Image (cartoon, rainbow, N blue to C red):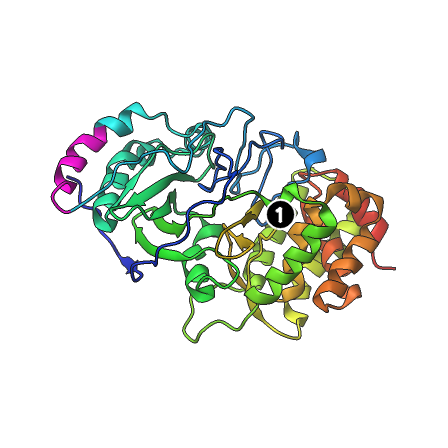
């Protein structure tokens, strides 16, 4: 058995039992390991705090930051599907048998492709032993991983000895998801999924998460309804983090992305004129400094990362926590509302500002700066940047 050297390990108290899935729950599951209906979205939709996920831009070039994929042919896993159950006497036999089962299961397609592209083949080869070790540590048995899966993590349903349903997420360490566990601990289930346990070792981060059932994505609801739900969740997530926290500043993230933009621009790529580019990137660097308050941010809150649940109507998954200006946190939702963004970006920005009690002009400034910053990879955002540029 492989022993995983652990530098950080947390284990929450045993969760209380939750009601069974509501009647009519679909047997399909999303890439984050939560129950949902079959997806009708493009198979290459994007997510991540810098990834523009608007459906009109599904054919945009790939980025190096975290993405997720979704296909129309998603394997089914009904809530009632039996999963292996661990107990003290059966754990050792389970660990011997599990490797064979892992070898029989196909690895998530998106994860395999990303591992090849990013040179993570060694990590992928070690994954079965890592999963086996985590199962034994946490006394949970993982089911078949969700397909096509995400591009940085292996995600699967998990079940404990008492039948408790959870999600096991095992990902390679990357910058934007470095403090997902910290954020979930800070929120403690208040608007976001609960974290039962976490392990950090070498280049791997593993999470044992609350499973959302039925898990339908908020993106299936009309966008005006999405606005209201997103605003309500953001109000709950924004808080001053505990003393001694590890969260990085929004300034650090914006500076890194601005540096990336300037490097690409110097290589000859351009989507906006030089003057507008300078103005937008200067704002992208300056806005974090001028914020009136600083709170814990999700940075990747959009309707694909909000799932229907039993404990609450909607819960946030896959946060990318930073600390900084709350105004920034509305941007990913704005960018995902592609049709309304094209039709009237000011009206959309003002609506979210009003729902959250934010300054309208500041929301527009952030939207302008972010559109410029993303415009090299998403050229349609250049036109939106021109339309809302400060006068």
Quadrant (top left/top right/bottom left/bottom right) for the N terminus: top left
Element marked by disc 1: helix
**Residue 197 appears in the picture as rendered:** yes
Q: Farthest front residue?
A: 23
Quadrant (top left/top right/bottom left/bottom right) for the C terminus: bottom right
Q: Is residue 264 left or right of residue 388?
A: left
Q: Residue at x 54, y 32 (%)?
A: 70
Q: Nearer the viewer, residue 65 or 223?
A: 223
**Residue 272 appears in the picture as rendered:** no
Q: Nearer the viewer, residue 245 or 285?
A: 245
Question: Percent position (x, y) of residue 83?
Answer: 30, 36
From the viewer's perspective, is residue 252 above or below residue 161? below
Question: Percent position (x, y) of residue 146?
Answer: 43, 34
Q: Nearer the viewer, residue 152 or 93?
A: 93
Question: Percent position (x, y) of residue 14?
Answer: 29, 59
| Residue 122 sits inside the magenta stretch | no
Q: Is residue 46 left or right of residue 118?
A: right
Mark 1, residue position = 303
| Count of residue discs | 1
The magenta span reads 88-99
Other-residue count near label 1 (Cα within 10 Å), few / some / many at <14 / 14–19 / ≥20: many
Q: Nearer the viewer, residue 112 or 276?
A: 112
């Amino acid at each position: 058995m492989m022993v995983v050297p652990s530098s950080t390990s947390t284990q929450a108290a045993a969760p209380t039992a939750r009601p069974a899935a509501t009647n009519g729950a679909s047997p399909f599951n999303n890439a984050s390991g939560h129950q949902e209906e079959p997806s009708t979205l493009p198979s290459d939709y994007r997510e991540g705090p810098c990834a523009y996920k608007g459906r009109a831009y599904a054919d945009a070039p790939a980025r190096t930051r975290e993405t997720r994929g979704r296909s129309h042919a998603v394997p089914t896993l009904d809530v009632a599907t039996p999963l292996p159950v661990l107990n003290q006497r059966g754990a050792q036999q389970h660990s011997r048998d599990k490797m064979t089962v892992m070898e029989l299961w196909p690895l998530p397609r998106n994860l395999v492709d990303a591992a090849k592209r990013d040179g993570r083949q060694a990590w992928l080869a070690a994954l079965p032993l890592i999963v086996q070790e985590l199962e034994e540590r946490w006394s949970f048995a993982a089911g078949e991983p969700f397909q096509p899966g995400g591009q940085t993590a292996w995600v699967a349903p998990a079940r404990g000895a008492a039948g408790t349903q959870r999600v096991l997420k095992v990902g390679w360490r990357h910058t934007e998801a470095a403090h997902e566990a910290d954020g979930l601990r800070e929120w403690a289930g208040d608007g976001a999924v609960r974290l039962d346990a976490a392990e950090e070792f070498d280049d791997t981060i593993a999470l044992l998460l609350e499973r959302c059932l039925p898990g339908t994505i908020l993106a299936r609801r009309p966008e005006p309804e999405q606005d209201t739900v997103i605003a309500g969740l953001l109000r709950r997530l924004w808080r001053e983090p505990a003393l001694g926290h590890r969260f990085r500043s929004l300034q650090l993230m914006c500076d890194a992305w601005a540096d990336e933009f300037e490097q690409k621009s110097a290589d000859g790529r351009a989507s906006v004129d030089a003057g507008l580019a300078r103005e937008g990137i200067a704002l992208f660097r300056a806005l974090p400094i001028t914020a009136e308050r600083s709170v814990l941010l999700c940075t990747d809150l959009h309707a694909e990362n909000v799932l229907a649940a039993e404990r609450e109507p909607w819960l946030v998954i896959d946060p990318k926590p930073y600390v900084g200006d709350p105004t920034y946190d509305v941007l990913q939702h704005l960018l995902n509302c592609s049709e309304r963004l094209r039709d009237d970006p000011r009206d959309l920005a003002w609506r979210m500002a009003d729902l959250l009690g934010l300054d309208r002009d500041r929301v527009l400034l952030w939207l302008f700066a972010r559109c410029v910053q993303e415009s090299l990879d998403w050229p349609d955002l250049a036109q939106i940047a021109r339309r809302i540029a400060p006068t």
